[in-house]
Amino acid sequence: MNEPRVRAVHVYNGWEGHFRKLHKADWFLVEVNGIAQLFPTEDAAKVAAYEAMTRHHFGDGILRDGETVSAERSQAEELFGKVFPGKGRKPVEVVRR
């Protein structure tokens, strides 16, 4: 449980970077297009492993900023008009009868 999440493994002509995923116990190689990468130093392999682990866990970063708009909200606004007004204003209560 308290084991490192990245490591550098010395191979014949360089260093390989390995990382662990959160939900797996196995070690995974740092790969580019399915090809394992070799690095000249141990530090370079560890940095690449940290970057690969971060990319795996968080994707390519934040894709958008702000509120997400759902299809249900758009459909509700089409049916009832402006149900969700802008910032600082109260939403309109919709009462079923």
Image (tube, rainbow, N blue to C red):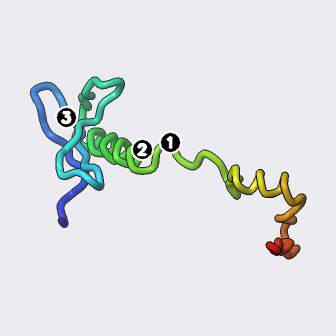
Residue at figure coordinates x 87%, y 65% from the top left: 85
The extreme left residue here reads 12
Closer-to-camera residue (49/77)? 77
Q: Are marks 2 and 1 in contact (CB under 8 Å)?
A: yes
Residue behind mark 3: 15
Distance from the alpha carbon under mark 2 to that under mark 3: 20 Å
Residue 55: give its label: 2
Mark 2–mark 1 distance (CA, rounded to whole Å): 6 Å
**Mark 1 residue element:** loop
Q: Is residue 64 left or right of residue 56?
A: right
| Above-or-below relation of 78 to 2 | above
| Of pointers 2 and 1, the one earlier in the residue sequence | 2
Secondary structure under badge 3? Answer: strand
Q: Nearer the viewer, residue 83 or 35?
A: 83
Neighbours of disc 1 within 10 Å: few (<14), some (14-19), many (20+): few
Three-letter amino acid code at the position of disc 3: Trp
Identified by mark 1, the residue type is: Asp
Q: Which residue is mark 1?
A: 60
Residue 90, located in which quarter of the rendered image? bottom right
Q: Residue at x 42, y 44 (%)?
A: 55
Residues 79 and 38: in front is 79
Task: Name the N-terminal-most of marks 2 and 3.
Answer: 3
Q: Amino acid at mark 2?
A: Arg
Q: Please state if 60 lies on the left or on the right of 30 as rendered.
A: right
Q: Nearer the viewer, mark 2 or mark 3?
A: 2
